[in-house]
Image: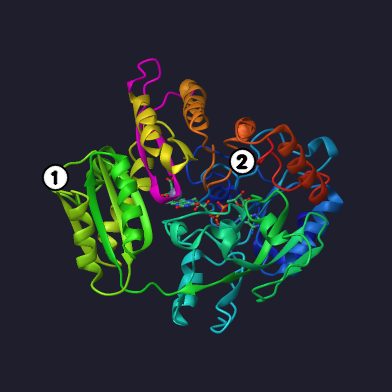
């Protein structure tokens, strides 16, 4: 098997030495570590197709990995006994797309660009910017997260409030199926309504339906001049009202993020300046664009909202943004045990109560934890990070969070997917019929269960 893989991708792109493979086999949070018989790094769709045909013939499971910044364990192979061993297969392969980095020419008329799966979000945006455009998806992991990864997780990110999630940016897709066939639907047509939306189906499939090898992304106008403001609020409801008022006043909300005093304190302890002199329970970062004097419009907006203390800077305001974007790293470095990361969403109207209910977890003496809440407030998306949780309390606290979220009619996964982390709770947001139909889709695409076994379906 290994020599045939080397014939396909080249000797130096089949890794078996543990020193070389270790970085691929543990996820970004450190909570998931898996086992693989080899890490394979194809360069082209044809090589991926040859690898998948071989794995299909030998019944070898394949875990697909892009930038390995996923936060639900989906980019790591199973950790248990070699999956597939009962079929006499070798242990899973890890297929890394990181060598697949070709970027096509930007179509400035059609406003789109075709990229290979391993191209990072940052590189897609840089190619767009060189042509006076921008990529509609942005997230703090932009330097590592890949085109294939953001499609496979249907990533949200900080621009979702303005441009929608990753699925909304897809015009076309190229993918290799579990049997090695190549599916290619690649057209810059704005309207093409022939049959099922297969590209849309692969968005959010988390490596369980196909190996995405290329994406044709729509591009959006480059960000005009913006104003970035951070303001302190006593109530989440006032923060939500501010976003609505901004829109009503003709401003375009390019981003709207919420943080808490505890999160800003944590980030401050890791070297980032506090944005405001006056402490506040909640801090909201908004980035807005518009016509006329946007800065004055934002000052008026904040004054009308009765905001006592705020800081405004012309975009990109990287120092202000870094306070929000360094939450993930600061949290990872501050917790005594692997952080319990629960990316959830609730209806916007339920956000104030959900924040109160989730913050109250800190008062649960039976299961001590340090909740740090932040997220994309305009999407109703709260990133619930529970620090210093005893391993024995992880499941009970996870179920408490999910009970709060579902009681508010929310979702147990807002943008990170299910991965391996949340497979026990997919019934909380999906009916038996829904789960059965998704299972039948999986069985149709991957009848032998070779692609990312254990992800989404457990
Ligand atoms: P990986 O982690 O390598 O894989 C993720 C999943 O996609 C796995 O199931 C994997 O099997 C599958 N996959 C990867 N490539 C392919 C492919 N070519 N074909 C088929 N399946 C594939 N996420 C958000 O949504 N919004 C955020 O704001 C955000 N911010 C983040 C900030 C930080 C600091 C970090 C560390 C992560 C953040 N994330 C965020 C999570 C993560 O960046 C996203 O889930 C991202 O989409 C993962 O991309 P990746 O290339 O790293 O994928
Ligand atoms: C973010 O918005 O920063 C990410 O989704 C990461 C996280 O949840 O930690
Ligand atoms: Zn996020």
Left or right, residue 22 beside residue 54: left
Q: Write down the residue under mark 2.
A: 34
> Of marks 2 and 1, which one's residue comes earlier in the chain?
2
Picture coordinates of residue 160, whole percent (x, y) = 47, 57
Residue in the foreground of this view, choosing between 386 and 36 = 386
Picture coordinates of residue 440, whole percent (x, y) = 80, 43
Check if residue 79 falls in the magenta segment: no
**Residue most toward the right?**
57
Residue in the foreground of this view, choosing between 441 and 310 = 310
**Residue most toward the bottom?**
109
Please state the extent of the stretch shown in magenta in the rendering: 363-391
Residue 315 seen anywhere in this rendered image of the structure: yes
Quarter of the N terminus within the rendering:
bottom right
Q: Write down the residue under mark 1.
A: 278
Residue depicted at 37% across the width and 19% down the height: 364
Residue depicted at 30% across the width and 67% down the height: 316
């Amino acid at each position: 098997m290994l020599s045939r893989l080397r014939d396909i991708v080249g000797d130096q792109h089949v890794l078996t030495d543990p020193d070389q493979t270790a970085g691929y086999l543990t996820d970004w949070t450190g909570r998931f570590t898996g086992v693989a018989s080899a890490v394979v790094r194809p360069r082209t769709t044809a090589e991926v197709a040859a690898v998948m045909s071989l794995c299909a013939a030998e019944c070898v499971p394949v875990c697909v990995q892009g930038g390995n910044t996923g936060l639900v364990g989906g980019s790591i192979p199973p950790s248990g006994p070699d999956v597939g061993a009962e079929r006499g297969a070798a242990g899973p392969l890890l297929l890394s797309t990181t060598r697949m980095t070709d970027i096509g020419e930007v179509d400035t008329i059609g406003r789109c660009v075709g990229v290979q799966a391993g191209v990072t979000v940052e590189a897609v945006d840089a190619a767009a910017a060189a042509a006076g455009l921008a990529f509609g998806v942005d997230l703090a992991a932009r330097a590592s997260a890949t085109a294939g990864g953001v499609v496979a997780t249907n990533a949200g990110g900080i621009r979702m409030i303005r441009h929608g999630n990753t699925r909304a940016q897809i015009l076309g897709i190229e993918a290799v199926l579990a049997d090695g066939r190549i599916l290619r639907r690649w057209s810059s047509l704005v309207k093409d309504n022939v049959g099922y939306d297969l590209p849309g189906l692969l968005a959010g499939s988390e490596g369980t339906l196909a190996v995405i090898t290329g994406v044709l992304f729509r591009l959006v106008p480059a960000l005009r001049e913006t104003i970035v403001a951070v303001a302190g609020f006593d109530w989440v409801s006032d923060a939500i009202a501010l976003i609505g008022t901004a829109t009503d006043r003709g401003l375009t909300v390019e981003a709207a993020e919420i943080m808490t005093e505890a999160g800003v304190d944590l980030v401050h302890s890791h070297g980032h300046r506090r944005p405001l002199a006056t402490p506040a329970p909640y801090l909201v970062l908004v980035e807005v664009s518009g016509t006329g004097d946007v800065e004055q419009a934002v000052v008026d907006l904040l004054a009308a909202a009765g905001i006592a203390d705020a800081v405004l800077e012309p975009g990109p305001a990287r120092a202000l943004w870094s306070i929000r974007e360094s939450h993930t790293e600061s949290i990872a470095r501050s917790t005594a045990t692997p952080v319990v990361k629960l990316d959830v969403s609730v209806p916007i109207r339920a956000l104030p109560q959900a924040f109160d209910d989730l913050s109250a977890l800190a008062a649960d003496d039976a299961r001590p934890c340090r909740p740090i809440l932040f997220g994309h407030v305009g999407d109703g998306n709260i990133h619930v990070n529970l620090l210093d949780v005893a391993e024995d309390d992880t499941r009970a606290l996870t179920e408490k969070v999910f009970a709060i979220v579902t009681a508010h009619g929310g979702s147990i996964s807002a943008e990170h997917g299910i991965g391996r982390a949340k497979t026990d709770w997919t019934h909380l947001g999906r009916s038996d019929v829904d789960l059965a139909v998704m299972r039948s889709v999986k069985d149709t695409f991957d009848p032998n269960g070779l692609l990312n076994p254990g992800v989404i379906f457990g």
